[in-house]
Image (cartoon, rainbow, N blue to C red):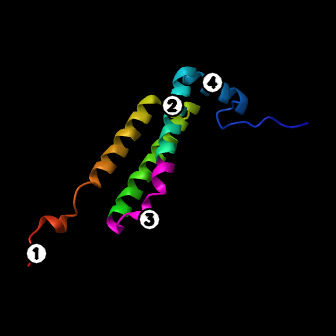
Amino acid sequence: MARAVRRPDGLSMEIANMRRAKLVPRWRGKRALRSAQVLDDVVNAQVALLPQLSPEARQRSADHLAEMVMLGQAYRHYAAGWISRRELERRGKAALRRMESTKRPPLEQLTERE
């Protein structure tokens, strides 16, 4: 006979999963999974183009694609009820900030060269 797995708070894993599933309404979870799939599709389409880019552009594009993969994972975590909508928004804004910061030219390009 298998024992029920217990969490530190005393809830069985099945009860904890049922409670978590109720945190995200079904339509929001489905929409979040669709958003994650769209991000995955964009990344898959763009990864094949990386070898054609210059080394600088390749690094910048790879960084952007990595941010998109992480954002897709955040959408999946939200759909599973592991993070809140507020946390999803925070992660999305942080990802956009990181992607915008890589668009700027390096500091050495902004100074005069002797």
Under tag 3, what secondary structure?
A: helix
Q: Residues within 10 Å of mark 3 (few under 14, many from 20)?
A: few
Q: Nearer the viewer, mark 4 or mark 2?
A: 2
Q: Are marks 3 and 1 in contact (CB under 8 Å)?
A: no
Q: Amino acid at mark 3?
A: Pro
Sequence-first tag of 3 and 4: 4
Contact? badges 1 and 4 (CB < 8 Å): no
- Cβ atoms under marks 2 and 3 closer than 8 Å: no
Q: Which residue is mark 2?
A: 32
For disc 4, the marked residue is 19
Q: Residue furthest right?
A: 1
Say which of marks 2 and 3 sits in front: 3
Mark 4 or 2, nearer chain start: 4
Disc 1 target residue: 113
Q: Which mark is residue 51?
A: 3
Q: Indicate which disc, 1 or 2, sits on the residue closer to the N terminus.
A: 2
Measured as percent of width and height from the top left, residue 39 is found at: 47, 41
Number of numbered tags placed on the structure image:
4
Distance CA(mark 3)–CA(mark 1): 30 Å
* Element type where label 2 sits in the image: helix
Picture coordinates of residue 74 (x, y %)? 49, 40
The question of residue 81 being in magenta is answered with no
Q: Nearer the viewer, residue 47 or 29?
A: 47
x and y, in percent, of residue 33 in the image: 54, 33
Report, in whole angstroms, how far the alpha carbon at label 1 lies from the one at label 4.
Answer: 61 Å
* Residue in the image at 11% along x and 68% along y: 111
Amino acid tagged 2:
Ala
| Predominant SS along the magenta part | helix
Where does the magenta region start and end?
A: 43-56
